[in-house]
Amino acid sequence: MRPRFALFGCNPLAIEVARCLAMAGTPFVMLDGDPARVEAAQKENLAARLIDYTDDDALRGVGIGDAIESVFCLFTEDSENVFLAISARALDPQLRIVAVCQAPEAASKLLAAGADKVVDPYEISGARVHELIQRPEVVDLLEQTVFGVQDLNVAEITIPRHSWVHGVHLSGLRKAMTQNLILLGVVDLERGRDLIFSTRGIDHKLDYEDVLVVIGARSEIDGFRDLIERATSP
């Protein structure tokens, strides 16, 4: 399979992202200009290769502007991520670019460079520590039930036109569910692309082409998809 995602930077963070993608069976390629880091990633049985990320032809050669759907700028230097974001955006205006920033002041530069989303690992870590201090029981529960599950996926399932779910409310769908997963909510395309969270207390009436968003193990998601695609109610 041709890679859909390109991870730039074969550092520990990128390797962890790559492991998650590999576990989900998502085609990707890891790229770095340092032979030692590339070799370290290859020893982890990850698809890693050398690249000069400052060369536009090299970026095209790995599929940017063609097969690559998303680029993850995971270099440890903000200046490298900024340069990469500018280059990748110039090659593909529709490309989704996610970048990690090391310094808070770099976030605005990365967004200006063309990144769609900037992740501050220190902000995330700080929020996690705060939650551990304030709500240790909740964090422990999440780690055991959500983050502790290795085969954890978020899926968007569109209600087909033959589905029995058309006209059913979210509460009715929940009663029919036997799968062990979390129904996060629904995207009603007639109202826009915003997710209507199931926790908001809105018992949304489902229609054809609505998108159900769920989180759980792949096998459970497959079972839920089969349930949605049935023509008659269970």
Image (cartoon, rainbow, N blue to C red):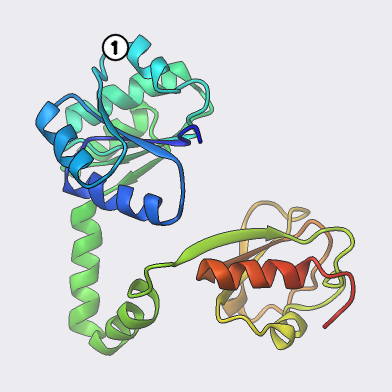
Rendering coords of residue 206 (x, y %): 79, 69
69 versus 232 height, above or below: above
The residue under label 1 is which amino acid type?
Answer: Asp
The residue at 14%/40% (across/down) is 40
Q: Which residue is mark 1?
A: 55
Name the spot of residue 150 as percent of width and height, x first.
37, 68
Say if 17 sits above or below 205 in the image.
above
Q: Is residue 75 left or right of residue 3?
A: left
Q: Secondary structure at mark 1?
A: loop
Residue 70, quarter of the rendered image: top left
Badge 1: residue crowd in 10 Å (few <14, some 14–19, many ≥20): few
Q: Residue at x 67, y 60 (%)?
A: 157
Q: Nearer the viewer, residue 67 or 90?
A: 67
Q: Residue furthest left?
A: 36
Viewer-nearest residue: 220 or 196: 220
The image position of residue 154, as x and y in percent, is 52, 62
The quarter holding residue 171 reads bottom right
Q: Locate the C terminus and report the quarter of the image it occupies.
A: bottom right
Tell me what residue is drawn at x 44 percent, y 67 percent. 152
